[in-house]
Every structure is written in C-alpha cells, then in structure tokens.
Amino acid sequence: MNAETAVTVIDDVDAYMTEVGQAARAAAATLRRATTRSKNEALAAMARQLDGARSEVKAANQRDLERGRANGLDDAMLDRLALTDARIDAMVDGLHQVAALPDPVGEVDGLRSLPSGIQLGQMRVPLGVIGIIYESRPNVTMEAASLCLKSGNACILRGGSEASESNAALAACITRALEETELAVSAVQVVATTDRAAVGRLIAMPEYVDVIIPRGGKSLIERISREARVPVIKHLDGICHVYIDASADPDMAQSIAINAKTHRYGVCNAMETLLVDAAIADSILPRLADAYRELGVEMRGCERCRVIVCDMLPATEEDWGTEYLAPVLAIRVVDGIDAAMAHIDRYSSRHTDAIVTSDYLLARRFVAEVDSASVMVNASTRFADGFEYGLGAEIGISTDRLHVRGPVGLEGLTTRKYVVFGEGQIRQ
Amino acid sequence: MNAETAVTVIDDVDAYMTEVGQAARAAAATLRRATTRSKNEALAAMARQLDGARSEVKAANQRDLERGRANGLDDAMLDRLALTDARIDAMVDGLHQVAALPDPVGEVDGLRSLPSGIQLGQMRVPLGVIGIIYESRPNVTMEAASLCLKSGNACILRGGSEASESNAALAACITRALEETELAVSAVQVVATTDRAAVGRLIAMPEYVDVIIPRGGKSLIERISREARVPVIKHLDGICHVYIDASADPDMAQSIAINAKTHRYGVCNAMETLLVDAAIADSILPRLADAYRELGVEMRGCERCRVIVCDMLPATEEDWGTEYLAPVLAIRVVDGIDAAMAHIDRYSSRHTDAIVTSDYLLARRFVAEVDSASVMVNASTRFADGFEYGLGAEIGISTDRLHVRGPVGLEGLTTRKYVVFGEGQIRQ
C-alpha cells in the first residue's frame, strides 16, 4: 500500500496540492484545540505503529536504496537514506521524547492589569499549517511530524524523491496511528508525489500554509526562499568563528578551538574560521597547528599565520566565506577584538560565533556587539544545538532574524496572541 | 532645500536605492551598539529641530496641499495630509514619549544554567534595517523614525508622493538632528524620489533590508506582500466581531456593543459584525437597535434579526466579509458559542474578536479557541491598540502570524539572539 502511494501518478498536481492544503487547514482548526493528552497519545500511537511496521518500513527503504544505487547516489547519500533498526529505534525513542516535552500551547505570559482596568496577557498558540521540505533523510518525516503535532500544528511533509518509498511507509504508520486517535488524520500529510511542481505549489498557497521550513542543501533553501509566497524559516550555512583574545587562557583556548573544529566536521555549528589575536599568535599558533596537524585538519592561513607556521596553505579571500563541513580550517591573525569583530561582521553567516577571553569588558562587548543567532564566551560553538540548549528537540537552526533565531524547538513553532480579560470595560 | 530634495530628479533609481540600502546597513551596525542615552538624545534633538522648523515644515505642507487640491484629492485625504500646529505639537510630544520608553535592546530573558555547565539566555537585539512604506499622513515619518531609532534599527522611509514636500521638510529636521549626535546620519533616510520603482527596489534587496512594514490601504499592502523579497509585517483589515452570549449581562453587552461600533468608525479595531445568541435575541436586539438607530448606525441583519427588528436591511454574504470603517453594522443571530466561533473562524480577519458572557467555561473556551491576534472577554474591541496595551507607541497592528501578532511596539521591532556564557566548556 505504501509502495502504491509512493508511485501513485497524480496528473493534476495543483488540484492535488490544493486538496492537501484544504485538509491541512481543516485539521489545524481541530489541532489548535487538542489537549496535551490527546497529542501525546497520538505520538505514542505513532511510536507503536512504527515499531510494529519495521519489516514494512525496511522493505520500502530497501527499494529506495536499490533505486538509489541504480541511480548512482554516492555512499554518503545512501547512508543518509538507510533506515537501519538502530535508526528506527532512534525514531521510536524520539517520538516518546517529544511526547514527554512540556506543551507550549496555552501558556500565558505577562498577564497584567492596565490603567483601563482590563487585564492583558499573551497566550502561546500554534502557527497553523507548516510545510516542511527536506531531502534524503527519511528520519526527518517522523521528527517533523512529531514536533508539528506536539506544538498543535498541522503539517505537510515533502521529502526527497530518493526516499519516496520509505516516506510513504512512514506516512502509513502515521496515518494508522492518527486513525486510532480523536485527532484529524490530515493533521500530518506526506505529499504522495515526487513531482517537483508539488513543491512549487506548496510554497505558494498562503491561504492553506502559514510557514515553510526547508531542510536541506543551500541551493534548495535559496530556491525556496526566492520563490515562496509564504513566510520561510530558513537554515542557511554555518560559517562559525572562534576568536582567541590575548587575554585567553591558552589551554582553554586550545581545547575550545580543537573541539569547535574537530568534534564533528559535517555540522553547521562547527568552527570554520579561527581568529587569533596578534599579541599571542607567536605563542599559541604553533601548538594549535601541532594539534590540528595530528588530527589531520588542513590549515589555510593568512600571510601573518604563515610566517609563524610555515607549512600552512595560503588562505584566499574565498576561504573566509566558505563553509567547509570538512577537516579544513581557515586561520587569520587579527589585531585585537575590533579587527576580530570586523572580520566576523563581514564574513560570518550569523549562525554562531565565540570569543575566548578572561577580560570582563571584552566579553561584554563581544556579547553585545556580535550580531549572530548564538554568541558565546569561553564555550565551543558546538553547543549551538536544540538539545544542548535544553529545547528537547530541534526542527532546524534559524539563520533568519524574524520570529525565531538559532535552534528552533517547539516554542519556535508557536506564536503569541493577546488575551484580554475585562468586566465590561469600554474605551473612553 | 527641502523643496529641492523633494523634487530632485533621480535618473537611476536602482543605483540610488542601492546606495540608500548600503548606507542603512552601515548605520545599522553602529546603531546596534548605540547607548540608550545617545538614542534618547537623538530623539530630543529631532523634537527640537522639528519645533524650530515649524514655518519651513508648514510651508512645505502648504505646497503639498495646493498640489493635492489641484490634483483633486478628496477632503479626507487632504485632512490626513495637513500638518497643523496641533499636529506638529503632537509629533514633538510623540518624540519625547518614545524617548521616555524603556529601551528593549540588551534585555536578557531566561538566563539559566544547563547540564553541560554553560549558562544560556536570550538577548533582545534590533532587527537591523527596516523599510517602511506609507501613504498620505506625513506624521508617520516622525513616528516611524522615532520607533525604529529607539529600537536600534536603521530605517528607510518611503512616504506617499502627495506628501513629498512635507516629508522632505521633516527629513531635513531629522538629518539636522542626527548631525548633532554621534549616531550615523543615515540611521534615518527618507527616500527622495516619488518614482514607484523605488518601492519595487526597496522591497527586493534582502542584502540591505531585513523587514518591510507597509502602512496604508489594503491594495498597497497586498501588492507589497506579493512582490516583496524581504519579510513583511503586514497590517491588513480588521473585521472584528463581538459575540453576545445568552449568559451576558444585558447592560454590559449593550455598552460594549455600542462602544465597539460607535466610539470611532474609521479604525481597524471597530466592530464590524455583531453576533447575538438566539436565546436572548428577542430581548436584547430591540434595545440595541434603538441605540444604533439613535446614533445613525445602519444595521444589516440576517433573516432571524429582521424578524425581531423589522426595519433592518438584509445582510448579504458579502456583508460578513466587509470592513465598513463606517456607521454600518452587520448583525447575525447565532445558536450559541459554537455557531458564533464557527462564524468568526470563517469571516474574521483575525484582528480582534470579543465575547460578552458571565459563563466561566464559555469565556475560557472563547479565549482558547478563537484564533485572532487579540481575543477579549467582556471588553470593547477598541482596546486592541498599542497605547491601550501599554506598549507606549505603535507602528502598526500585525495581522500576520509569525514574529509578532497584534499591536507592534518597540519589542516587535527587535529579535532575540542566544547568548552563552562558559568557563571553557566543550562538547563531549
């Protein structure tokens, strides 16, 4: 059945997406009112259904993998695509974890009485309908569905065509789970066509979709941001910096600089450029270089670096603006915090930037003046993450400025309305 | 000089707007760091300059008014365009009021320690560069400039062509004021061309502009939302409802229903549709009708209304979706709160909706389930206003869902970045 869904040929994609949108809008109206208990029961049912459909899911995933190999997907892509038992376990656990998170919906902030006598507060409410467009990893289907559902939003999920069979199998689990509950089955819909026109329509129906969250490569996200007629919460690249000030403790500076670069290479919160205060470059660069060399990190330095560490490759202008996602590091010697912040202001993708210092005033200045989603003092950029920030889960990391910046958890999928309590007050 | 500015002919509008955008981006970087004192001093200087340039401003306004009359602007438009001494006084007072407001920038929420040992909080920071596009009222120039400046944002202001001389005169005051301060003069820029292409460019340069706030008629706002390549905080229409439940105190219901409709007609938070519970329609509709009749309000009722109050005009489907902004009211008899909320869900513009009731459970349901920017119990919809909500000032009322809903004050012009304080923590 899931296989069918995946290969269903839909001739009128616009009409199909319109139906999907209408169903999502209708579901959103009921989800808005859903109790925390009923949402958590739905998440538990999804976990049960997924756990019980392992063979079905793995078989579908096999078909995707075979097609992927036939189409010459590289090993990295095939790995992202694969649904092993361990990954299915992780999805099941993830569903229970989201069920265990506090429900942000209905929370009222800042309730206060005003001179007119009315009492005013702001209540958290769902955004409505969320469209999520993602690429090869089918796990995203469950992650996204669970976070949207817990936050009271209906969602329309559009996965990568290479994962179509796997996503259809996961969609079948979700549908069976929702059928067990009082929630609308269309609360979670997985787009059942791989036709690219479906994406074009999904991002251009503001009457049915309130926000689009693209998860994937830069080109996908840029295309969607360019063409969307709906607000987009985007996660672009992470060109993260660590600035080591002359006042830094050298051992702390080294452990942060090593962790930020080498803890994991392919992640957006890894450091891509290291900035070193000229006043300590001579003493700290050689030991850092030894450590990076040992770990197999290719160093690309500015001219001043290369005078100190001769075997560094020369960094070009392009390096300052590159997200390597690899064991490659750009290094630049700068004259103090002002030059460091000027470099960051010019080249940072405004994702995460850190300073290592023991100087109180410099720490305050860096925090106040660096304009990035996460600004850190004496900590590794690798902490910029929804789990590390205690959000419990993460649907992405926003590099946008409006609505939500940095890791996006359940709260980022809600908005606030004003609530007014009166006893007959009228405007004079 | 201001006259000149207003009539400056700019042949390459794209190049001009690009320069304006670059200057705004540069100013934003310094404004972000500006102290509350320096921002308040700039606001005080703006007030002084405006107060000292009354004759210049009024002369420029006279030229706009004459051109307006020649171009056949109607009286309402000419009235909005006119800058009397009273209105200049109000602008001067407004500048001092904004200076007196607390500065939201730098405020840190929810600072807490996490298991990893890092301390995490969220700091309020400016959005960056705000583009504001508005129509005839030149007062908006000062209001918008002051709110953007106080919230640490650079702004690009594009007023209506009919007010070009007035806006240029006000721009000259602002420029002279900024020249007295340490802030960048390009912190506030008024577009010096009435060429419509300038708007097209302003809303399509995300590299220089972070958000667009259109203030004006529905067609202007819809056009901008459609064409913008930058996030837009929009203020569309206010089709506001009051639902009188059977449990309502009749006198309270009447005073709220009268105030919500008749306190002011041309405002977005005025009630446009009154919903009356069938259980009390017989008793309350006649007395409400008498009151509206006396105040010259035209009533358009559903069939059930017209059985009770025979002289009502029949309401058509179109009435339920119309923002009259006039002494006209649509009235519908509904069967209890569910029918009322169904009507609101279908026809409300999600600006402001209210219930009058003495029933605790119904009040809770209405507040939880009605999806509008402001949801009220036993209060007039006219309270949905930045001043009444204690925001101190208002740049508009957002009918969007993301970032900010309802009245937008200084806080709505800011965003929050994560700040992390560590002592050398690294990710394990």
Image (cartoon, coloured by chain):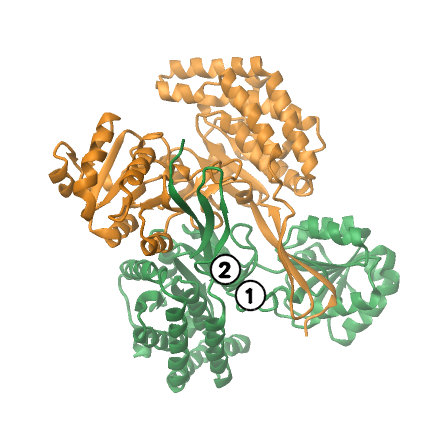
Chain colours: A green, B orange
SS state under label 2: helix
Name the quadrant containing residue A195. Answer: bottom left
Q: What's the CA distance linking mark 1 and mark 2? A: 8 Å
**Nearer to us in this view, B155 or B26:** B155
Residue B207 drawn at (x, y percent): 57, 45
Q: Is residue B100 left or right of residue A377?
A: left
Q: Quadrant of the C terminus of chain B?
A: bottom right
* Disc number placed over residue A391 in the picture, else none: 1
Label 1: how many residues lie within 10 Å, few (<14), some (14-19) or many (20+)? some
Label 2: how many residues lie within 10 Å, few (<14), some (14-19) or many (20+)? some
Q: Residue at x 47, y 22 (%)?
A: B163
Q: Residue at x 70, y 29 (%)?
A: B181
- Per the image, the residue denoted by label 2 is A411
For badge 1, the amino acid type reads Leu
SS state under label 1: loop
Residue A310 in sight from this viewpoint: no
Residue A185 in sight from this viewpoint: yes
Name the subunit of mark 2.
Answer: A
Q: Quadrant of the N terminus of chain B?
A: top right
Residue A247 drawn at (x, y percent): 84, 58
**Residues at badges 1 and 2 in contact (C-beta under 8 Å)?**
yes
User: Is residue A304 placed above or below B174 in the rendered structure?
Assistant: below
User: Is residue B123 placed above or below B393 in the rendered structure?
Assistant: below
Residue A87 drawn at (x, y percent): 50, 81
For badge 2, the amino acid type reads Glu
**Nearer to us in this view, A6 or A306:** A6
Name the quadrant containing residue B369. Answer: bottom left
Do marks 1 and 2 both belong to one polypeptide chain?
A: yes
**Nearer to us in this view, B386 or A357:** B386
Q: Residue at x 19, y 43 (%)?
A: B281
Dot 1 or dot 2: first in sequence order is 1
